[in-house]
Amino acid sequence: MTATALAKGESLAAQVKRLKYGLYTVPSQSESGVYWTVVQRGDGDLQCTCGAGIYGRPCAHLAAVIVRRQQEAKRRERKQAA
């Protein structure tokens, strides 16, 4: 994951919507009203449906899901520790 994708992903993380386990939508940064889908494949890897993602390149949408999942994991850890 590139530093640029991670930086953009951090700004998008709050807008990630989890539809069900392993399936997320993330808004496009360049097209109003467009959402990209990030799915967890059978091998556990995440893949985005945007132009970069379908070719396996890093994208902000994928980074946003990774950041969001890390944030949720930290929240669960804090809750369990309390």
Image: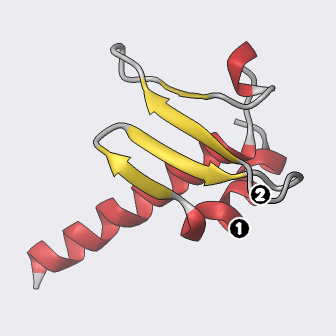
Screen quadrant of the C terminus: bottom left
The front one of 43 and 38 is 38
Q: Which residue is mark 2?
A: 8
Asked if disc 1 and disc 2 are in contact, CB closer than 8 Å, the reply is yes
Residue 43 got which mark?
A: none
Spatial CA span between label 1 and label 2: 5 Å
Question: Which of the 4 image quarters holds residue 29?
Answer: bottom right
Under circle 1, the secondary element is helix
14 shown above or below 38: below
Give the left or right position of residue 49, taking residue 19 as reference.
right
Q: Residue at x 73, y 47 (%)?
A: 60
Residue 78: percent from left, percent from top: 22, 77
Q: Within 10 angstroms of label 2, few (less than 14), some, or many (20 or more) residues?
A: some
Under circle 2, the secondary element is helix
Give the left or right position of residue 78, taking residue 52 as reference.
left
The front one of 16 and 77 is 16
46 shown above or below 29: above
Q: Within 10 angstroms of label 1, few (less than 14), some, or many (20 or more) residues?
A: few
Which residue is outermost to the right? 30
Residue 76: percent from left, percent from top: 22, 68
Residue 58: percent from left, percent from top: 73, 31
Q: Residue at x 73, y 49 (%)?
A: 34
Query: Three-letter amino acid code at disc 2?
Result: Lys
56 shown above or below 72: above
Residue 11 got which mark?
A: 1
Residue 66: percent from left, percent from top: 51, 47
Which residue is outermost to the front? 33
Query: Three-letter amino acid code at disc 1?
Result: Ser
Q: Residue at x 41, y 20 (%)?
A: 41
48 shown above or below 28: above
Q: Residue at x 29, y 73 (%)?
A: 75
Question: Which of the 4 image quarters holds residue 1?
Answer: top right
